[in-house]
Amino acid sequence: MKRVLSVLALAAASSAIAMPAGAAPNDPTYRAVASGALESPPNASPGTSLVTIDLGGKQMMVDLPFRDLDGTTTGAHVHCCTSTAFTGTAPVAIPFTDFPTGVHAGSYSKSFALGDEMSYDPAFLSAHGGTAQGAASALVDGIDANEAYVNLHTSAYPDGEIRGWLVAAPPVPETAEWSMLAVGLAGLMWMSRKRPAA
């Protein structure tokens, strides 16, 4: 019984991952673990980042902490769309405006309006019909197909020091689901205490 409770508690805890501010629990969420080994070509950078992107309606919310970069930051972007999942390079789709530059570590959070043409790189927008609707459709399709990645560029690696492929993340349980789980676990614990010792 204790083993079952431990497994249930561990499963619940592992699914509780923080979302960017303003994200709803049912928004499609994508994550990327960025490193130098995933660059094209790979490099030995010790830099890392866990990028979270939530596509909520007409918004793309980005949460991007980063650290231990060899060079100082010069920019960051979402690139889309490669011809094959998890491989190749692609043009910039959404440049991360106001990204902190000249640092080895930091954090970046921003919301981008997918319905606003100004959110997209002009070349990406032009390549997808010149409209925000066409660009948004291509971006979401590319992310869903694992053909999009986040790239951080630095002074040491101008073409990109660390990158990570965007992949779908499991949904975060809603408050009602957490409440039901807590009540169920409390009931199991109460029942286990009421049993006479053998």
Image (cartoon, rainbow, N blue to C red):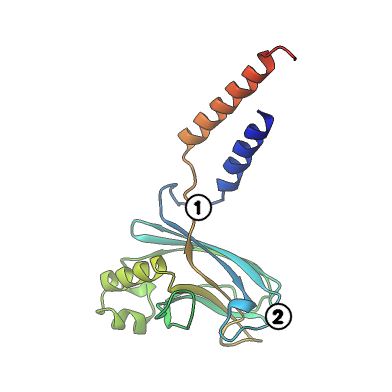
Compare residues 110 and 55 and report the one nearer the observer.
Answer: 55
Residue 159: x and y in percent read 56, 87
- Residue pushed farthest front? 198
Q: Secondary structure at mark 1?
A: loop
Mark 2: few/some/many CA within 10 Å (<14, 14-19, 20+)? some
Q: Nearer the viewer, mark 1 or mark 2?
A: 2
- Residue 68 lies left or right of residue 112; in this view the side is right
Residue 191: x and y in percent read 62, 18
- The reply to whether residue 97 is in sight is no
Compare residues 18 and 73 and report the one nearer the observer.
Answer: 18
Residue that label 2 marks: 70
**Which amino acid type is marked by label 1?**
Ala
Residue that label 1 marks: 21
Residue 153: x and y in percent read 58, 81
**Which amino acid type is marked by label 2?**
Asp
Q: Quadrant of the N terminus?
A: top right
Compare residues 45 and 67 and report the one nearer the observer.
Answer: 45
Q: Residue at x 55, y 25 (%)?
A: 183
